[in-house]
Amino acid sequence: MTRTLELAKNLIARKSNTPDDAGCQDLLISLLEPLGFKCEKIKSGNVENLYARKGTEAPFFVFAGHTDVVPSGPVDQWISPPFEPTIKDDKLYGRGAADMKTSIAAFIVSIEEFLKETKGFKGSIGLIITSDEEGVAVDGTVKVVELLKERNERIDFCLVGEPTSHLKFGDMIKNGRRGSLSAKLTVKGIQGHIAYPHLVKNPIHMVAPAITDLVNMSWDEGNEYFPKTSWQISNIKGGTGATNVVPGEVDILFNFRYSTASTAENLKERAHAILDKHKLDYVIDWEYSGNPYLTKKGRLVEILSDAIKETVGITPELSTTGGTSDGRFIANISDQVVEFGPLNATIHKINECIDVKDIEPLKNIYKLTLHKILT
């Protein structure tokens, strides 16, 4: 069993359902401090965060990731208990195997081997590890970033270990993510008996033309790195459950996944303009999850791409698709943030797993990236 696999299994065995760290970060500290890292525990609410750094000089290279995982779902549907790491058919099964405890194990072992292989290096190495990425993400990486900002500590290069590979390990790097803007829209009408339409105002009927306009609106054209901004309804709720009652109001949950071609404020203004055009009686509560971020082609993208090609023989594609990540917070103190990790085909699913054959190459890509940047 390789060192990386052993550590990955040790982390998976800890039941760190978000936002519980379940001792994962203490394990990492026990491995990092003997290597000369200064480790800080940064608590916020019931969330554990770890900030570790070795060195004081530039360039400052940081690995970032999360120890928390999503709930396992029905345990009886797993081929083995989700927090008992199991190898079967050359795959490592367990909650967090792909997202993203194996990446964290690869961080640590790549650093250990890098330090053994170099008599000295130019710059600094750091880690930002949180237990609040899979949840609401208000007490996690964002709090570490706020602290570093207060100290005027900027990060030159950050590699987030999210599972980015799509069809084959090494085929995709995320060099940015779309922003996320959600809202709850409540449209008010007048409730009444469905047989007396002249005495009611059906809010579902009233909002339908506005929904059509929101669906058909071209919010932006995207750009070289991002697809067009998308507006999607996730839930509609209205009515009493009876077939003969017109509801008094309807609640609609929707979300923008938006590119750097738009801003949250501009999207809000345009949405309000459409709703106002239809003279609706409405209330809207906005929930902002974070701006899009983008790392254009440059040194970090080139170095990581070269490391992947040298290790597994694949030239990775750059992509900004998928959900949000903590990269959006780190981008506030770093101009170069990218994400790279294992295949994402099983993340958040029952029987989450990673191919064992991909584990050492993952560690080697991280280590080669360290060599290329710091030596």
Image: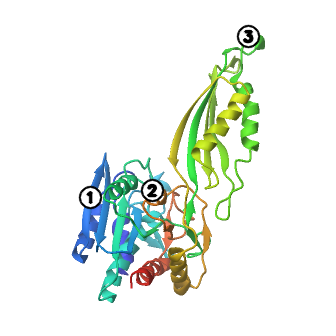
Q: Secondary structure at mark 2?
A: helix
Q: Amino acid at mark 3?
A: Leu
Q: Is residue 154 above or below residue 132?
A: below
Q: Residue at x 66, y 37 (%)?
A: 271
Estimate the spatial distance between the alpha carbons at disc 1 and disc 3, rounded to whole Å: 62 Å
For the residues marked 3 and 2, what is the alpha-carbon distance in whole angstroms? 51 Å
Q: Is residue 1 among what the camera can see?
A: no
Q: Quadrant of the C terminus?
A: bottom left
Residue type highlighted by circle 1: Lys
Mark 3, Cα crowd under 10 Å, few <14 / some 14-19 / many 20+, is few
Indicate the position of residue 329 as horizontal and vertical percent values.
Answer: 45, 56
Q: Which residue is mark 1?
A: 41
Circle 2 residue:
329
Which of disc 1 and disc 2 is earlier in sequence? 1
Residue with the mark numbered 3: 199
Which of 156/249 is in front?
156
Horizontal and vertical percent for residue 89?
51, 75
- Horizontal side of 358 relative to 239 (left or right) equals left
